[in-house]
Image: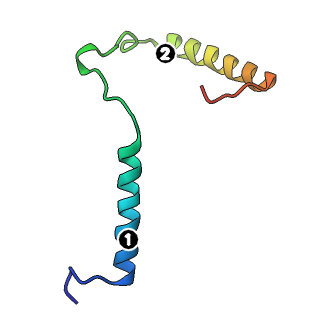
Amino acid sequence: MPADTVTPDNEKQQHRLSKLIDLLKSWKGEKPDYDNLDFSNWHQTEAEYQKEQSEWLKKRKKRSSSGESTDK
């Protein structure tokens, strides 16, 4: 069977792919500003990283215990 023959399965795949492409095009994501990237924590020590993660986790736990959304 030639590769360009349309079969029901091929048609379903094309439809799904088309829907996915449409979805991705609809997102309003912004491209990163490659000229002004923030690498301030690039040389972060392990201790600094652990402290930052600990603070983040405390905030998450506090939000979840208060019933706030933890999506942020």
**Amino acid type, callout 1:** Gln
| Residue 59 picture quarter | top right
| Residue 13 picture quarter | bottom left
**Left/right of residue 45 with respect to residue 6 in the rendered view:** right
Residue at the (24%, 84%) spot, across then down: 5
Residue at the (28%, 20%) spot, across then down: 33
Residue 23 marker:
none
Q: Are marks 2 and 1 in contact (CB under 8 Å)?
A: no
Task: Name the residue beneath numbered marker 1.
Answer: 13
What kind of element bears circle 1?
A: helix
Per the model, the C-alpha gap separating discs 2 and 1 is 46 Å
**Left/right of residue 6 with respect to residue 46 in the rendered view:** left
Q: Position of residue 56 (x, y in %)?
A: 61, 18
Residue at the (35%, 54%) spot, across then down: 21
Give above or below for 70 relative to 10.
above
Q: Position of residue 9 (x, y in %)?
A: 39, 80
**Amino acid type, callout 2:** Glu
Task: Name the residue beneath numbered marker 2.
Answer: 46
Q: Position of residue 6 (x, y in %)?
A: 29, 82
